Image: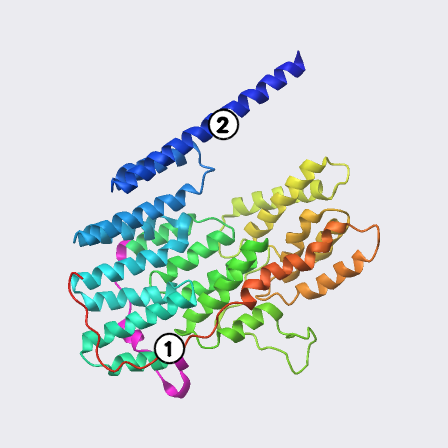
Amino acid sequence: MKRMLLFLAALALAVHAAMAAEDINELARQARVANGEHRFDDALALYTRILVDHPERTDMYTYVVETLMAKAQAASDGKRYDDALRTYEEILTRRSERVDSWYYAERGIVSVLIKKGDLPAALRAAHLCLDAAPTLDDYNATIAQAANLMSAIDSNVERANQFLAFMQSGATGGLANPLDAVGYPAQPDRERAYDLLRQHAGDNAAAARIRAYTFLLSGRPKEAFPFFADAFRRSVGIQEMQRAALDLAMIGFRDLRGNGVGLDAAVQFVIDGPNGPDRTPHTADDLPDSFAPFLPPAPEVGKGGLANLSPDDLAALQKVRTACMLYAADPWVHGNLRYHSCLALAKLESALDNWGAPGQLDWYLDRAFAGGNQMLPCVFAEARGRELNFGGIYPVLDRIAAHMENPKSNSELGNARKDFDSIIGPLKTAHTKAAPLKPLTKPATFSRGG
């Protein structure tokens, strides 16, 4: 009878899950139809309903943002410019679940302001776009747009070409960035929204990244950089470490100086660390620290970093961490519980900003050598520690390789070097040099309403 009850309970759960999936698919289908008919508010209501009933379906946030972008574009096409601006601003201030969409929303604001004929405001908004550009292609496109706006405002190309020269060569030869004098938009409502968002963003790498972007999209790139560093120190796992490394070198470091010159050196430093490609200190290929001149010392390890945790929250996290370490290290604990303890530990170390604490690397390595391959992301995070580069991981890879020579070793650790190559792969292939920027020969023109 007991087995029958368990079977029926499992069957009921499976049926419920299947019915829930059907409900979600039907609501999503209705939302797509509503979008196609430009009933954007109906589509948003349907996606919101899914998220309320099934908060685990975070993929729906992507559709929410896509719907808002389509709604803004439709308003702009219909010359309802203020409606378009409000919708883009909604993405920027209320959709932190998809911070990667913020650049595109700000770019939409630039387009609307150009259509309104307010070119000076469009140029200030383009300044924000330049800081938030997620790729080199987006960065180059925004440079070209800003230069064209300058030339159209001035009815000559002098200032625009000064700007292009600065973007090409940086401050070499005493060049200045004309955008510094342009400044950023005054946006008190956005500032208030971002202040609140920073208070409640959370305590992991994604939260630090959100905080960084709130500073970028409010014209404060120098304040953003410490949070990109905070995200890098908290990051754990292949995708998170990839993203944090690219953000640190390709966005945060770029925006500190207002141009993309020297990104190749910053990326190389992240990959190799101060010892350079030969991994040996005090040799010809040692690399200078690209970031140290722009940052205060790292926060004290294990105290929550820049997340402003309350003393009570800090104490609670430390208490849970101690318990998880006991479970993760006890070979008599059921494997499933140990596995989830390891997952929890990764989150706790990130929340506490505790990667790189003294003695932890050997503890995590011992757990991995004992068969806990799920500890490998933690081993990488510990080997990186407090440093803003991956140089500390190479000696650990050598230790793992030496351990693998034992025929009784944990064979799954054999993927360690492959996993690390996955982390640094996007850095190695990143485009760090902008294409040559050609000076303008005549002012650009923008048609109102076009």
**Can you tell which quarter of the image residue 167 is in?**
bottom left
Toward the bottom, the furthest residue is 173
**Can you tell which quarter of the image residue 144 is in?**
bottom left
Q: Give left or right: position of 272 versus 91.
A: right
Please state the horizontal and vertical placement of residue 111, each as a whole percent of the image: 25, 61
Toward the right, the furthest residue is 407
Q: Are marks 2 and 1 in contact (CB under 8 Å)?
A: no
Residue shown at 32% from the left, 79% from the top: 163
Q: Nearer the viewer, residue 399 or 47?
A: 47
Question: Could you classify mark 2 by the number of other residues whose Cα lies within 10 Å: few (under 14), some (14-19), or many (20 or more)?
Answer: few
Instruction: Name the secondary structure under disc 1.
Output: helix
Q: Which of pointers 2 and 1 lies earlier in the amino acid sequence? A: 2
Q: Give left or right: position of 160 versus 275.
A: left
Question: Could you classify mark 1 by the number of other residues whose Cα lies within 10 Å: few (under 14), some (14-19), or many (20 or more)?
Answer: many
> Which residue type carries mark 1?
Met
> Split into 4 quadrants, where in the image is the N terminus?
top right
Toward the top, the furthest residue is 1
> Magenta span covers which residues?
167-189
Instruction: Name the secondary structure under disc 2.
Output: helix
Please state the horizontal and vertical placement of residue 201, each as a whole percent of the image: 44, 49
Q: Nearer the viewer, residue 181 or 188?
A: 181
Please state the horizontal and vertical placement of residue 119, each as a whole percent of the image: 20, 68
Name the front one of labels 2 and 1.
2
> Which residue type carries mark 2?
Ala
Residue that numbered label 2 is attached to: 18
Q: Give left or right: position of 123 versus 48.
A: left
> Split into 4 quadrants, where in the image is the C terminus?
bottom left
Label drawn at residue 235: none
Is 176 contained in the magenta span?
yes
Is 351 contained in the magenta span?
no
Q: Is residue 102 visible?
A: yes
Residue that numbered label 1 is attached to: 167
